[in-house]
Amino acid sequence: MIITVPNIVLTTPAKVVGKIDKKILQIIDRMKQELVDTENPRGVGLAAPQIAVPLKIFITRSTPATPIEVFINPEIIWASKELSEISRPDNSKPSLRHEKKLEGCLSLPKIWGYLKRPKKVKLRYLDVNGKQHEKEFTGFMATIVQHETDHVYGILYTKRVLEQGQKFYQIEKDEKEKEKLVEIKI
């Protein structure tokens, strides 16, 4: 089960994974199942703290056809100075949140915010075999990697939205079932 705000594990920095053993692999399998089972909205990433496990692990799946990738002990070691708004794959399901370039989170259901993140990042991490990697991400994957890395450091995307002086929104349907954005006052 994916936990939601105000659960304290979401805003507490997670612990480094020491040994990748059977227990860690079971946690990763549980995370994969949660991500696959989440449909509305469909998740593109999930961090271990979101299932109440305070460890530095996250997984990604940018589209339903993309294989799930696992990142253990992730650390952003470089970020471009150039910022960009979220850009989703062309084959993503059209919606108002996509059109308005809003970022969301499975742990903050139905709340969306506009923010810009570095366009490119380089991530250092371990895979499930304990092998260290350094990989550069751009576009939608750069956004996902930054969002999920923030999670394992106890940072929610809402903090980033506030840091940039942006607003939060809910998407509601009008009497004709058409989506509309409604600003949330904080």
Image (cartoon, rainbow, N blue to C red):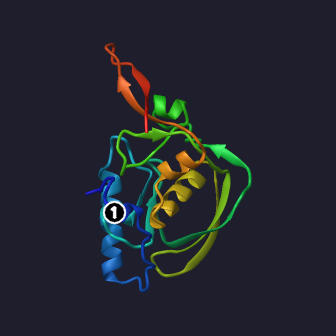
State which quadrant residue 32 falls in. Answer: bottom left
User: Residue reaching furthest left?
Assistant: 1
Looking at the rendered image, the quarter that the N terminus falls into is bottom left
Vertical side of 184 occupied by 135: above or below = below
Which residue is at 32% across, 48% downward? Answer: 38
User: Residue reaching furthest top?
Assistant: 176
Q: Of residues 142 and 104, which is closer to you in this image?
A: 104
Which residue is at 46% across, 55% downward? Answer: 156
State which quadrant residue 21 falls in. Answer: bottom left
Vertical side of 83 occupied by 183: above or below = above
User: Residue reaching furthest right?
Assistant: 81
User: Residue reaching furthest bottom?
Assistant: 19
Query: As drawn, is 139 to the left or to the right of 74?
Result: right
Instruction: Provide the secondary structure element on which disc 1 rests.
Output: helix
Query: As drawn, is 173 to the left or to the right of 117?
Result: left
Q: Of residues 134 and 104, which is closer to you in this image?
A: 104
Where does the image place residue 105, in percent across and percent down from the top left? 42, 48
Where does the image place residue 75, in percent across and percent down from the top left? 57, 70
Please indicate, yes or no, whether residue 62 appears anywhere in the rendered image: no
Which residue is at 44% across, 70% downward? Answer: 13
Please indicate, yes or no, whether residue 39 appears anywhere in the rendered image: yes
Looking at the rendered image, the quarter that the C terminus falls into is top left
Residue with the mark numbered 1:
8
Vertical side of 96 occupied by 165: above or below = below
State which quadrant residue 161 falls in. Answer: top right
Residue type at mark 1 is Ile
Which residue is at 51% across, 38% downward? Answer: 102
Where does the image place residue 80, in percent across and percent down from the top left? 72, 57
